[in-house]
Amino acid sequence: MLRLAEGDQHALSELMRRHSPRLYRVAVGYLRDAEEAMEAVQEAFVKAYRSAARWDRSAQVVPWLTRIVINESIDRYRRTRRRRALEEPLDEGDAHDGRWAEGAPSPERKVLGRELREHIDSAVGSLPDRQRAIFVLRHYEGMELNEIAGALGMRLGTVKSGLHRAVYRLRELLGPVAR
């Protein structure tokens, strides 16, 4: 990051090589869409490149990049949600040739799995932005609470209460599905 801040353009590729897999996991956990997540990560690196000269050298790189990708993911999520509200979803066709691999889940199990995934995605998506970010970083990315606090620029107590509220809300929303 120091090299990038000093104008070394080759430093960006090294930064991307080191951090893009982790940032991608954060974005895909938040957005639940591989293409959107990839675009969010790419845009985050563009923003990091543009603001490298203003980067606070005392700040740690990983939390700073994580914050950028979370902000970009939040923006993309909001845009997508608005766009989806205006569009009518199409039915997904069953594009198979009638043959099932041995040991593959039955069509009923696939439908149940897809429905459960949709319920979970919907429930996580309905959380307030801050709670969703905390929940995704903790449960999808496996970050420690103090890491989340650093990445989001929050106090540890705020992260703990946000996570508690998110889990409580998800239990409320998913309670009927779990039964």
Image (cartoon, rainbow, N blue to C red):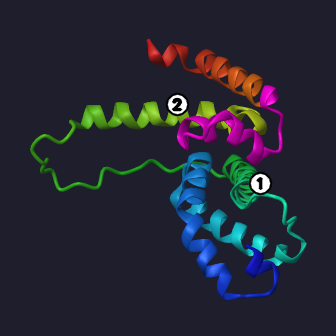
Report x, y in % for residue 140. Answer: 54, 41
Q: Nearer the viewer, residue 162 or 111?
A: 162
| Residue in the picture at 76% in, 22% down | 161
Q: What amino acid is at disc 2?
A: His
Q: Which residue is mark 1?
A: 71
Q: For residue 133, say whether it is visible.
A: no
Q: Quadrant of residue 127?
A: top right
- From this viewpoint, which residue is outermost toward the front? 58
Does 179 sit left or right of 151 as displayed?
Answer: left
Q: Which residues are magenta?
A: 133-158
Report x, y in % for residue 58. Answer: 84, 60
Q: For residue 87, say whether it is visible.
A: yes
Mark closer to the observer (2, 1): 1
Q: Which residue is mark 2?
A: 119
Specify the quadrant that holds the C terminus: top left
Q: Quadrant of residue 132?
A: top right
Disc ID at residue 33: none
Q: Is residue 138 magenta?
A: yes
Q: Main secondary structure of the magenta part?
A: helix
| Residue in the picture at 73% in, 33% down | 131
